[in-house]
Amino acid sequence: MTTSVSPQVAVIGAGVVGTSIALALRRRGAEVLLVDRDEPGRGCSYGNSGAISAASIVPLAMPGVLASVPAMLLDDESPLYLPWRYLPAALPWLLRFVASARPAAVQAAAARLAELHAGALDAHEAMARELGVPELFLRRGHLHLYPDEQALAKDATGWRMREAAGFRVERLDRAGIEALEPGVSTRYRIGLYLADHATILNPLRYVQAMASAFVAGGGEVLRAEVTSLAQGPGGWQLRTAGEADARAFQHVVVAAGAWSRGLLAPLGVPLALESQRGYHVQFTGGRDVVSRTVVLADRKVFVTPMEQGLRIGGTVEIAGLRAPPDERRAAVLGRIARENFPALRDLPAQTWMGHRPCMPDSVPVIGPAPGHPGLWLATGHGHLGLTQSLATARRIADALLG
């Protein structure tokens, strides 16, 4: 730090991104309040697939995405689904999404994601060790599966981008797949293996360990909903439900995920952010069905061993913050899981839906809000918040503390 007085900082949002930022700032001497309507890690950080995936540099919007829009609207089992009723509200975002699929824009986004992901695995392994939860970090690679060459060809551009960025990909035949994961359905004949990837076996416990370290180091956690945020003399006024008076801060970091746009709109800060609603089905007792993260790539489904069981995550649903979960989406995941892993057929399962904050180009917004001194943005991480969290925290801490 360049000053002798510790800056007063509020971090809004206690998911993995916000909690990482609060911890990084506190460790470097700032006085930090971490505020969220729920306890740390209970949002989409709770329900994600736990992947630490440095090679996930391929944006959601790729060349040719315009041709997939009819399926998004008509097929409620499409991996990327937009209900008709939400189309008018989603249209501005959708137009930016389609524009982001231009080849030059895709290459630029991939380069920015690769830069953000650099060193992610080592950073998370070190963090888990520092937090006293090294057992949560599983460095056993990610196995992407395809039924045939035709299915693989649909993703060929993405794999070329990963290899061009320096990621090592090992191709496996059926025997190679069985050597790693003998429980996978015989439907899958081609595997692409990223050996140097990892999984967090309990994302909620990981975030809670971060929050505990933050509090133990002198940070404050407030469970309350932020009702207003306003710029005042010398800083920012933050008001929460249940508190009569506003609190004053020199800096505010908005890391509120899919709710960030609503907080920023009254301040005149535009953010082309949409909720990328994701679902999971978790089978109790099925953890040993796979021994690492397995991706059924043709279905865009992640299969992940967790401390509490086997988690099947996936789908992107653009339907806003207010609509209730669409149980059909979770049912599709459950059906895919049981079809491809017979050991799951008789196991009980629970479902979940969460809101992942998604930018049209899949690149998160990290840094100062233009024209608003002391206001910082850390949102739009989509389904890669866990992978990107520690790098985001480092960038915000470096910039905010000079």
Image (spheres, grey):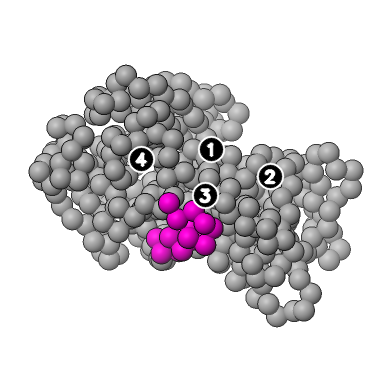
Q: Nearer the viewer, residue 358 or 82?
A: 358
* Secondary element at tag 2: strand
Q: CA distance from mark 3 to mark 2?
A: 17 Å
Question: From what the image shows, is residue 60 above or below residue 399?
Answer: above
Residue drawn at the location 20% of the way across and 49% of the way down: 192
Ranked by sequence position, the earlier of labels 1 and 2 is 2
Ranked by sequence position, the earlier of labels 3 and 2 is 2
Q: CA distance from mark 1 to mark 4?
A: 19 Å
Q: Is residue 81 left or right of residue 177?
A: right
* Amino acid type of the residue that numbered disc 4 sits on in the rendered structure: Thr
Residue drawn at the location 52% of the way across and 49% of the way down: 206
Q: Which residue lies under the disc numbered 3?
A: 206
* Secondary element at tag 1: strand
Q: CA distance from mark 3 to mark 1?
A: 19 Å
Q: Nearer the viewer, residue 382 or 140?
A: 140
Ranked by sequence position, the earlier of labels 2 and 4 is 2
C-beta proximity under 8 Å, tags 2 and 4: no
Q: Which residue lies under the disc numbered 4?
A: 304
Tell which tag, 2 or 4, sits nearer the viewer: 4
Q: Which residue lies under the disc numbered 1?
A: 355
Q: Quadrant of the C terminus?
A: bottom right
C-beta proximity under 8 Å, tags 3 and 2: no
Q: Is residue 180 left or right of residue 330?
A: left
* Amino acid type of the residue that numbered disc 1 sits on in the rendered structure: His
